[in-house]
Amino acid sequence: MSNGLSSRYIAKTLPMTHNYHSKRHGEIELAIQNGVVICRPMGAFNLDGVINYEKVFAEKIRSFNSKKWALLNQYKEFEICGPEVIKRIRSQLVWSQAHGCQVIGFETFNTVQEYFVRQVTKDIPFKHVLVFSEQQSTEFQIAEINNKLSGED
């Protein structure tokens, strides 16, 4: 067990121009710590930013190669996103659940983020959806997630 983050991946969102002159918005940091995939979104995401994140996330999960895993989303630097992004994130969570994610946790910092969590997880059959406050350490969050993942309540 390591106290630090390992397998750190950052997908920087560099400007990407389409024929309608859109640019990607949002940045993501992905890591694995004590068997939990940690996702730290930063900034406000548009659809291009979330699609870029999907590619990096799917690659990370494939390399994780576990039939039973957990995801922790830490929203300290995550800003608001539009309805098209919420819909896309819901599909990512459905994909995650279908590919072995049994426990999902969210560290939220305001009521808007808490509302967002309820919207994106609604009716997705995760074994457990946990919401943490900023006062709870990452180590505590990971321990709680691993307890739920192993079946200990």
Image (tube, rainbow, N blue to C red):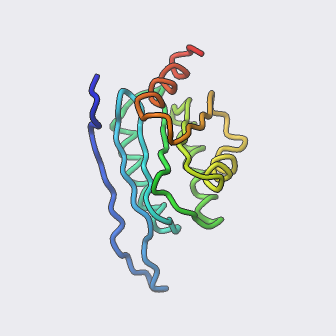
Counting the numbered discs, the total is 0
From the viewer's perspective, tell me whether residue 27 is left or right of residue 97: left
**Residue placed furthest toward the top:** 152
The quadrant the N terminus occupies is top left
Task: Place residue 60 in its image quadrant.
Answer: top left
Residue 90, given in percent of the width and then of the height, sits at 62, 51
Q: Residue at x 68, y 51 (%)?
A: 115
Q: Residue at x 69, y 46 (%)?
A: 118
**Residue placed furthest toward the right:** 123
Of residues 117 and 49, the one drawn nearer to the viewer in this rendering: 117
From the viewer's perspective, tell me whether residue 143 is left or right of residue 81: left
Of residues 96 and 103, the one drawn nearer to the viewer in this rendering: 103
Residue 72, given in percent of the width and then of the height, sits at 48, 38
Q: Residue at x 55, y 40 (%)?
A: 133
Q: Residue at x 45, y 85 (%)?
A: 21
Residue 36, given in percent of the width and then of the height, sits at 42, 32
Task: Place residue 19 in its image quadrant.
Answer: bottom left
Q: Is residue 100 above or below residue 94?
A: above
Of residues 89 and 140, the one drawn nearer to the viewer in this rendering: 140
From the viewer's perspective, tell me whether residue 96 is left or right of residue 34: right
Residue 130, given in percent of the width and then of the height, sits at 60, 34
Task: Place residue 17 in its image quadrant.
Answer: bottom left
The quadrant the C terminus occupies is top right
Q: Is residue 134 above or below residue 64?
A: below
